[in-house]
């Protein structure tokens, strides 16, 4: 069995995946089994629209927070933490230290771009 070489790893948000699945669905008219299951999950898990996700990603990157990588930004987009405590829990999974001040800026950007949950 051949072992494929991984050329590049790129973080992919749930919103971007949803958009890609919709394009595939239009092109092929019907999704395969795995793609169908993935679509079900994505429709339930996606909390943002494409515009909101793009705006939020741009805002977080403009904050220019040291050591915050695209991978962590994508995770923040997927989970949309509304408080400092929620953001701390998300960032605990990474070997990353972000000051409380910078985390407050991230939460403020989220609350500015995304309307409050109902």
Image (cartoon, rainbow, N blue to C red):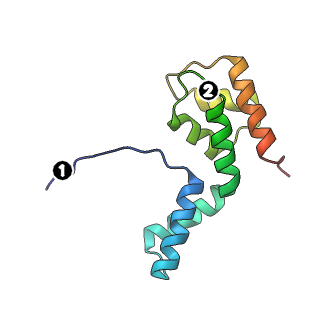
Question: Which residue occupies 70% across, 31% down?
Answer: 106
Location of mark 1 (residue): 3
Q: For numbered disc 2, what is the local secondary structure?
A: loop
The residue closer to the viewer here, 68 or 93, is 68
Q: Nearer the viewer, mark 2 or mark 1?
A: 2
For residue 16, above or below residue 99: below
Location of mark 2 (residue): 64
Question: Which residue occupies 78% across, 32% down?
Answer: 108
On residue 99, the disc is none
Residue 5 position, x and y percent, is 22, 47
Residue 73 position, x and y percent, is 58, 37
Position of 36 with respect to 86 (left or right) is: left
**Distance between mark 2 and mark 1 Cα atoms:** 38 Å
The residue closer to the viewer here, 25 or 32, is 25
Question: Which residue occupies 56% across, 63% down?
Answer: 19
For residue 84, above or below residue 58: above
Position of 2 with respect to 21 (left or right) is: left
Picture quarter containing residue 91? top right
2 or 1: tag closer to the N-terminus: 1
Residue 109 position, x and y percent, is 75, 35
């Amino acid at each position: 069995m051949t072992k494929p070489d991984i050329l590049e790893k790129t973080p992919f948000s749930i919103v971007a995946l949803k958009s890609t699945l919709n394009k595939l669905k239009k092109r092929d008219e019907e999704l395969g089994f795995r793609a169908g299951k993935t679509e079900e999950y994505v429709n339930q898990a996606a909390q943002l629209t494409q515009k909101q996700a793009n705006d939020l990603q741009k805002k977080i990157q403009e904050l220019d927070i040291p050591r915050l990588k695209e991978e962590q930004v994508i995770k923040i987009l997927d989970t949309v933490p509304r408080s400092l405590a929620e953001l701390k829990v998300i960032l605990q999974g990474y070997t990353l230290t972000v000051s409380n001040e910078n985390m407050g800026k991230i939460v403020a950007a989220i609350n500015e771009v995304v309307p409050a949950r109902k």
